Image (cartoon, rainbow, N blue to C red):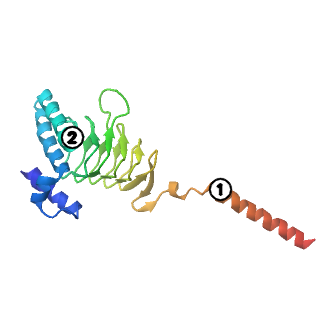
Amino acid sequence: MLHVRETLQAYQKNDPAARSKLEILLLYSGVHAVLCYRLNHWLWVHHLYFLARLLSQLAKWLTGVEIHPAATIGRRLVIDHGTGIVVGATTVVGDDCLIYQGVTLGGTGVMQGKRHPTLGNNVMVGSGAKVLGPIYIGDNSRVASNAVVLKDVPENSTVVGVPGRVVRINGEKTDHAHIPDPVAKELQALRDRIEILEKMLKEK
C-alpha cells in the first residue's frame, strides 16, 4: 500500500491534469504499468520466472508499457503518457524518476551481464529518447526528447541530440554549447580581410 500511495502522490505532483488520486488509480495506464511491474518483480525475485514474464506480457498488452520483471525500479516512478516505453531486464531506475512516452531504456547487443542503463534519482527522460547500454545517468539529470544517449551523463546535467551530448551541468552551459559556428568564423575572417584591404586602398 505504501508504494501505491506514494505513486499516486507523485503523479499528482508531476501532472497538473491529475484531479484526484481515484482518477489516477483508475485511469492512468502508467500507474497500472508500475503496479503490475511491482507484482511481476516480486514473482521474479521468488523464482517464478515464467509467471512473471507471462503477466508482464499481459501488462504490456493492457498498458502499452513493457517493463521486464527483472528490472530494478525505485520508489515514486511516474510514467506519463506511457505508450511505447520499453525497460530492459538489467535496467536500474532510481527514486522519483519521470519517464515520458516512447522511451527506450535498452541494450546495445546480446552480451551477458549488465547491458541496460542505470538512472539515478530524480532523472527525467523526455518523449522518444533512447538510453542504451550499461551507462549511468546521474542524479537530477534531464534527457531531452528524442535524444540518443550512449555515454555516461554526470549529475545535474542536461543531455540533448543524436548522439546525446551534455549541454548543461548545474545550470551552466558546457564547452560543447560554446563551440563557435564554423561558417560564422569564416565570414568574420572575410570581413577582417576586407577591412584590411580597404584600409590599404585608402592609404595609396
CA distance for labels 1 and 2: 47 Å
Residue located 36% across and 37% down the image: 133
Observer-nearest of 60 and 98: 60
The location of residue 138, given as percent across then percent down, is 33, 50
How many tags in the picture?
Answer: 2
Secondary structure beneath dot 1 equals helix
Crowdedness near tag 1: few (<14), some (14–19) or many (≥20) residues, C-alpha within 10 Å: few
Q: Residue at x 11, y 54 (%)?
A: 25
Amino acid type, label 2: Thr
Residue at the location (25% across, 45% down)? 93
Q: Which residue is mark 2?
A: 72
Check the image and report above or below for 121 versus 56.
Answer: below
Circles 1 and 2: CB atoms closer than 8 Å: no
Confirm whether residue 75 shows in the render.
no
Residue 115, by quadrant, is top left
Left of 48 or right of it: where is 127? right
Image vertical order of residue 32 relative to residue 14, above or below: above
Residue at point 51% right, 54% down?
A: 176
Q: Compared to 82, does 11 lie above or below?
A: below
Q: Is residue 137 visible?
A: yes
The quarter holding residue 43 reads top left
State the mark number for residue 183: 1
Image side of residue 194 versus residue 3, left or right:
right
The mark closer to the camera, 1 or 2, is 1
Q: Residue lying farthest right?
A: 204
Where residue 145 appears, as percent x and y from the top left, is 38, 52
* Amino acid at the residue labelled 1: Val
Mark 2 nearby-residue class (10 Å; few <14, some 14–19, many ≥20): some
Residue 8: image location, x then y, percent: 14, 56
Q: Which residue is more in the foreground, 133 or 169?
A: 133
Residue 147 pos. (x, y %): 41, 48
Mark 2 or mark 1, which is nearer the start of the sequence?
2
